[in-house]
Every structure is written in C-alpha cells, then in structure tokens.
Image (tube, rainbow, N blue to C red):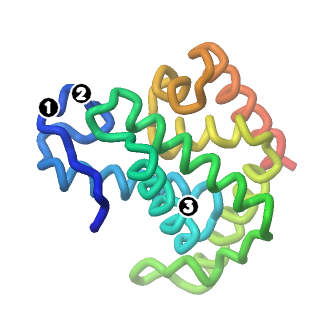
Amino acid sequence: MTYDLKPSSDSRDRPVLAPGLSPQAGLEDLRRRLVRYAVRLVWNRDDAEEMTQEAFRLAVEKKVTTADAKFGPWLFRTVSNLCLNARRRRQAEPLLGNIEPMHGESAEVLAQHVERLERLRNAVDKLPAQQRVAIVLRSEQQMSYDDIAGVMEISESAARGHVHLARKRLIELIGE
C-alpha cells in the first residue's frame, strides 16, 4: 500500500481504524472494509478497488488525515458517492464470472447460489440510493446507526428509517 496518509499515533482519535493494529495494518484493514463495501454497491471487484483507491487519493488531496474524527465516515461517504456515480454510467456485469466455486461445490449448487445473488443484486439495485447505502453499511459493514448517520450526514433516526425501508422493500422484491 503506497498511500501518502500518515496514521496518527493515538488510536482513540480514529475509532474507524481497528484498535490493537499497527497504524499501517489499521489502514490496510480499513481499505479492505472499504473495498468490500464498494463491491456491494458496484458489484465489480476491480471497480471497487479503483473507487477505494480514488477515495484515498482524494483524502490525500484534501488533506483529510487519520487524526480527523471524521476520517472514516468521510472515506465511506466518498466511496459511496464514487460508486453511485459509477453505477449511473454503466450496466452491471453478470456475477457468474466473478464467483469462484467452494471446494467440493457442484455446478448446480454454484448456479443456485449465483441465481440467489442475482436476485438480491437486482433487488438492491431497485432501492433508492440512500436506502441502498444504508442497508449495505448496516448489513455488510455491521455499522451502528450512529455511524451510518455520520457517513450519510443524516440524523440517526433517518438512518434507522432508511435501513427499515430498505429491508421492507427487499423483502417485497425478493418475495416476488
């Protein structure tokens, strides 16, 4: 990893970085979390890596450092915006080429797994952007509602509302 970010030495200032890790390992852990999050928004690992790299580049350009209390939420919000902008410009790719079979998994089981993921992806794609971001942050990143509110720059009750509405709509869409 060759970011120009300089981790601060006081981990209490940056709760988004995992405690107990070295500053570099903490940034790498954060990068992996951001990539995982971006994959759920753009459904393409290569694009997700690019969005995450671009977010870190913007952090360096805008002088947002790990010492800033808003470092993590700022990165998640930036990755969200980059991913949502990219999604508007292109079509989703089929998942079959991006999923590797588990050891001993038959082609039929893999096909069923891909079909379920495609249904989920199509349902998530139909959600409004804020609901999509909120449900991915809650489900995939396991963020608290307070953290989601910080990333999305909304109130905690609004974050709860977006997650609730997204869950409700996903149940309706997947049930179809």
Which amino acid, by three-letter code, is at mark 2? Answer: Asp
Q: Residue at x 21, y 45 (%)?
A: 7
On the image, numbered disc 3 is attached to which residue? 39
Please report contact status of discs 2 and 1: CB closer than 8 Å, yes or no: yes
Which amino acid, by three-letter code, is at mark 1? Answer: Asp
Identify the secondary structure beneath mark 2.
helix
Q: Nearer the viewer, residue 35 or 58?
A: 58
Q: Residue at x 72, y 75 (%)?
A: 93
**Left of 16 or right of it: where is 41?**
right
The tag earlier along the polypeptide, 3 or 1, is: 1
Instruction: Using the numbered discs, state the Cα–Cα distance from disc 3 to disc 1 in whole angstroms.
Output: 30 Å
Which amino acid, by three-letter code, is at mark 3? Answer: Val
On the image, numbered disc 2 is attached to which residue? 13
Q: Nearer the viewer, residue 11 or 118?
A: 11
Query: Disc number at residue 10?
Result: 1
Identify the secondary structure beneath mark 1.
loop
Please report contact status of discs 3 and 2: CB closer than 8 Å, yes or no: no
Instruction: Using the numbered discs, state the Cα–Cα distance from disc 3 to disc 2 in whole angstroms.
Output: 28 Å
Q: Nearer the viewer, mark 3 or mark 1?
A: 1
